[in-house]
Amino acid sequence: MLWRLTLRSLWHRRATLVLVVLAIALSTALLAGVERVRQETRDRFTSTVSGVDLIVGKPSGALNLLLYSVFRLGEPVANLDWGSVEAITKRPEVAWVVPISLGDNLRGFPVVGTTTDYFRYYRYGRDEPLRFSDGEPFDDVFDAVLGAGVAARLGLKVGDEVVLGHGTGTVSVRRHDTMPFKVRGVLAATGTPVDQSVHISLAAMTAIHLDWVAGTPLPGRHTSPDQARARDLQPDSVTSLLVGLNSRVAVFQMQRWINTRAPEPLQAVIPGVALGQMWRMLGMVEQALRVISVAVLGVALLVMLSALLTALNERRREMAILRALGARPWQIGLLMVGESALLSLVGVVVGVLLLQGVAALVMPVLSERLGMALSLWRPAPLEALWLLVVLVSGMLVGLIPAWRAYRHTLSDGLTPRY
Amino acid sequence: MSTEVLRCQDLIFGWRETPVLVLESLCVAAGERVFLSGPSGSGKSSLLALIAGLVLPRQGSVAVAGQDLAGLSAAGRDRWRARHLGIIFQQFNLVPYLSGLDNVLLAASLSGIGRAPGKEQALALAQRLELSETLLARKATELSVGQQQRVAAVRAMIAEPALLIADEPTSALDDRRRDHFMTLLLRESERQNSAVLFVSHDQRLAAHFDRHLDLPALNGATPCSGD
């Protein structure tokens, strides 16, 4: 009966209480959303490099090296010599190496110069290999393989012709228009930066820069594609190197060898360690977001408290009636706590639904901007804890009007004072 | 079992330090109808709170249906009140967001007697107070004042209390409705053999009662305003 009384009482005041529920829902969606973004970015970044044991480049900081070689974020500082690539490839611990050469773009999408080993050895998520949704790996010098996102966004398919732009910006003043590429293959979507990349061979990377010195085209020289094919297109250097080992046990040993004994000063980075460094940095931002979310929860709870206390003054008569009918003071207190608990519960449910709605509507846009398929659809493990925090704090807030109602019932007798 | 449903003796009571109620003796016999005229400031609120067992007297004793209330725990007094007392207020008697029937059934469920009176019983009682099932299904706020007071009467009497306390229940009604309400209320209380303690300042109603008491005359404490 008490339960029914609570429901009826809340329904009776639904016009004002809708706002209370909305406030709690918003704070719930924020708290859970921050948790999901945190979890999802971690999962995504980790899954992107899941198959790589070491990333090798010129010394420039572990995080920087990781971000530009795998996530296409930031700028590479210097290249490593091809001789180093060969020296590392020869090591017995090494199973495969995939060189990466960056610096050009296709209408803003980064161009990755690499070898066909990239398609063979790169792994993401739970040991997933790359798959072609159409076509095949590049074969000719002027073949390109597009990530799923690039093909979809630019409306390109196998057989189409593309002209690459110089530099990594979105708008290229200088374009490699004398050497157009033909789309040879399109990769299936992976949810990693691979989707947003254009892949060409290292030879192609050398070819399109034959007439260039230090980032500018030499005036008066126009090598044609056929002339380029006749030249020696072996690269002198690459931006970085993804390395897979025969056994993960050797990873520290190999890292030490590269850092100290390679032919030139190099840095080898264990992706997981570098990511850890990044999470520690991002931890502050996440903490700030959490503080804001908790503050919003605080405001929502104050909104609820003010609604309950305002109603309480109007309900002193009702409390006196219940007392006259034999209701115990604690039953009246429970009525109050039950109301705040129920409001919090509805708020939490609406909040989670709100978050799912945002996940469905907003995340596709955000994912494209980030170059990674973020999904906020799945609940994060820690989320349950936050939902519990909202519920319990909502219930605790109910104790304040409950205590006041209890005091009223003792002092009012049968005739409520106002 | 005592034949007295209410016995107040040598009462001294005050919410704060100054006593607002000093009462030598007030008794109501089973089935008796007592008219108590008590204007505001006469200690009426205190007396009703004492009889209901919401508060205990500083001195003296209050016995309801043969039980000294001081001998019960707070929980016991709440149960005793639900079981043996029916209370009708001046107005706004009903929980506004419940239907009339739910108001009645709420009282029945709080009265805590083994077999709570059910819906049929409530409807039968309502019928005798000229309330149809359709009216009872309406929300309290959708009923007229007269209908609300009759629902309140049904609610007060659903557990067949030994003593019915009515605190100015007709003050919000016009003459015709007031007389009608009095007739129905007293007829039903007689049928149930409930004693009635009727508090009012409207002397015209006194004719309906066996005995008349004047609270300011009974109360030995200095009357204070705003009680």
Image (spheres, coloured by chain):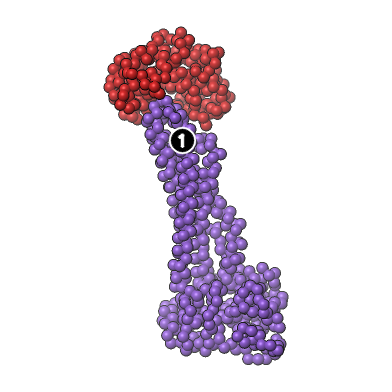
Chain colours: A purple, B red
User: Looking at the image, can residue A353 be seen?
Assistant: yes
User: Could you tell me which residue is drawn at 54 percent across and 78 percent down?
Assistant: A76
Q: Position of residue B220 (x, y in %)?
A: 32, 16
Count of labels in the image: 1
Q: Position of residue A180 (x, y in %)?
A: 70, 80
Q: Quadrant of residue A152?
A: bottom right
Q: Position of residue A90 (x, y in %)?
A: 49, 87
Q: Quadrant of residue A18?
A: top right
- Is residue B140 or residue B115 the one in the foreground? B140
User: Could you tell me which residue is drawn at 60 percent across and 66 percent down?
Assistant: A369
Image quarter in which the C terminus of chain A is found = top left
- Is residue A278 or residue B74 the one in the foreground? A278
User: Looking at the image, can residue B160 be seen?
Assistant: no
User: Could you tell me which residue is drawn at 46 percent across and 80 percent down?
Assistant: A268
Residue tagged 1 = A312
| Label 1 chain ID | A
State whether residue A409 is above or below residue A212: above
**Neighbour tally class for label 1: few under 14, some 14-19, many 20 plus, Cα within 10 Å:** some
State whether residue A330 is above or below residue A21: above
- Is residue B131 or residue A249 the one in the foreground? B131
Q: Secondary structure at mark 1?
A: helix
Instruction: Find the residue positioned furthest to the bottom.
Output: A231
Amino acid under disc 1: Leu
User: Could you tell me which residue is drawn at 70 percent across and 86 percent down?
Assistant: A225
Q: Position of residue A371 (x, y in %)?
A: 58, 68
